[in-house]
């Protein structure tokens, strides 16, 4: 019981996988433990995001500081997502995983069975909620974030005497939500045990062999972004050792891997970034909740490479211009992807429509991708969450905050 949380989570994952191999029937019986844990995590997401962003934005004080902080945050999101897409684009064109793939008829799917995300314009429109209460009730995180930012900004415009009690209320509400969150997080090893048990039983192996090269391509791209691009950015922008940050985020990565959800991992990410990295609540409560929905490096990489993989399998030679459309649309679609398991797979329809690949054969390939998506989804969630945490540290450093990591070399 004295082990650190990430070791407990890894032990839960290992025991869940072992149980699934030894007794699939028993593994499915303990799977509801994972469902209960996920429900508890989802329970805290909306109130945690609303109170943290409202308190964070209102606590910034000067609206000019808010504009500067927001500009830095979105610039970081766009740069890292664009770099991830470029890595995926390069690898899928070099490896060409779709060339020669034969798709079985039984893998055909009906796209109407999946929740369609709509167009890119629809994604931008749904950022503004018609009814903030309904957005919160339905789990529309983008709508909640937009309203919380707007509401927090309104508090900064109030006279000090009126703003102070409102700010105090939301700061206290956020602290209370963090207490609830800590209680839920303590159950993570048990929840992960149930989640992994079900995942290992349900995955199977036949389809993994059929699209093995596709999986290798995506995994290689995610690995490059995770182990090369993000650490280099971290070092260049903070002059700190990225290994220190990765060690500090070990429990966050384990949670992201097991839940496949940036949003579900958010409570632990907030806690780790503040306590272990030394980022202030003012920065973390603004950057991280937004990042869990907007900053999806792994998802952006996956959507770009996935569409080109489908085009290769169908014998469609995309021109440079068409691939550029894929890149831009994948970036926008990743912004609109919810921080929930396999959201990127649903959003891939936007990118397919952007280049006119809407045939039944293309939907069949999406079905194959869906069948083997679970391990890739787990990995790309780790990439997404790691990028979020690095973004918070980078922005905190740019704001002159003192980090808990020792400095390397010179800041000049």
Image (spheres, helix red, strand yellow):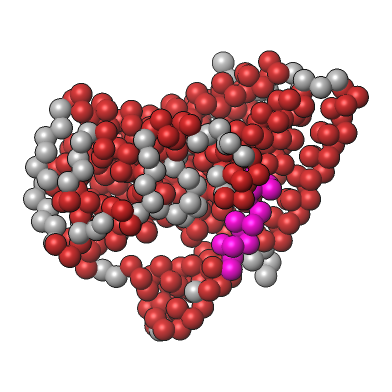
Residue at x 9%, y 42% (from the top left corner): 315
Q: Quadrant of residue 165?
A: top right
> Foreground: 167 or 124?
124
> Foreground: 12 or 324?
324
> Residue 364 placed where, x, y %?
20, 55
Inspect the magenta stretch and tell me whether residue 41 lies in it: yes
Residue at x 29%, y 70% (from the top left corner): 204
Q: Quadrant of the C terminus?
A: top right
Residue placed farthest to the right in the image? 161
Using the image, determine if residue 409 lies above or below residue 403: above
Residue at x 73%, y 25% (from the top left corner): 154
> Residue 210 placed where, x, y %?
18, 60
Q: From where the camera sits, is residue 220 visible?
A: no
> Residue 163 placed where, x, y %?
84, 27
State which region is magenta.
36-49
Left or right? Give the position of 148 relative to 257.
Answer: right
Residue at x 68%, y 47% (from the top left corner): 48
Q: From where the camera sits, is residue 133 visible?
A: yes
């Amino acid at each position: 019981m004295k082990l650190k949380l990430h070791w407990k989570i890894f032990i839960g994952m290992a025991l869940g996988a072992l149980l699934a191999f030894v007794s699939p029937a028993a593994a499915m019986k303990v799977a509801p433990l994972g469902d209960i844990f996920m429900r508890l995590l989802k329970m805290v997401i909306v109130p945690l995001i609303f109170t943290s962003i409202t308190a964070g934005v209102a606590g910034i004080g000067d609206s000019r500081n808010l504009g500067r902080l927001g500009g830095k945050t979105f610039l970081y999101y766009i740069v890292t997502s664009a770099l991830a897409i470029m890595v995926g684009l390069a690898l899928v064109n070099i490896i060409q995983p779709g060339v020669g793939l034969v798709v079985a008829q039984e893998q055909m799917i009906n796209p109407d069975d999946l929740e369609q995300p709509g167009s890119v314009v629809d994604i931008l429109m749904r950022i503004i909620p018609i009814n903030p209460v309904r957005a919160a009730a339905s789990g529309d995180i983008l709508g909640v974030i937009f309203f919380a930012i707007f509401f927090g900004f309104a508090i900064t415009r109030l006279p000090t005497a009126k703003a102070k009690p409102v700010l105090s209320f939301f700061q206290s509400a956020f602290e209370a939500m963090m207490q609830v969150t800590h209680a839920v997080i303590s159950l993570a090893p048990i929840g992960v045990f149930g989640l992994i048990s079900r995942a290992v039983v349900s995955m199977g192996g036949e389809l993994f062999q059929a699209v093995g090269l596709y999986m290798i391509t995506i995994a290689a791209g995610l690995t490059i972004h995770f182990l090369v691009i993000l650490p280099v950015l971290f070092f260049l922008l903070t002059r700190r050792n990225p290994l220190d940050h990765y060690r500090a985020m070990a429990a966050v990565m384990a949670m992201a891997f097991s839940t496949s959800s940036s949003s579900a991992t958010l409570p632990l990410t907030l806690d780790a970034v503040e306590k272990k990295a030394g980022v202030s609540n003012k920065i973390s409560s603004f950057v991280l909740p937004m990042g869990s929905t907007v900053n999806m490096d792994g998802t952006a990489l996956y959507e770009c490479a996935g569409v080109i993989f489908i085009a290769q399998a169908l014998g469609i030679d995309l021109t440079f211009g068409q691939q550029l459309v894929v890149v831009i649309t994948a970036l926008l679609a990743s912004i609109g992807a919810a921080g929930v398991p396999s959201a990127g797979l649903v959003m891939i329809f936007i990118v397919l429509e952007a280049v006119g690949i809407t045939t039944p054969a293309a939907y069949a390939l999406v079905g194959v991708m869906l069948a083997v998506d679970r391990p890739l989804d787990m990995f790309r969630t780790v990439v997404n969450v790691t990028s979020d945490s690095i973004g918070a540290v980078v922005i905190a450093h740019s704001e002159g905050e003192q980090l808990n990591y020792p400095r390397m070399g010179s800041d000049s």
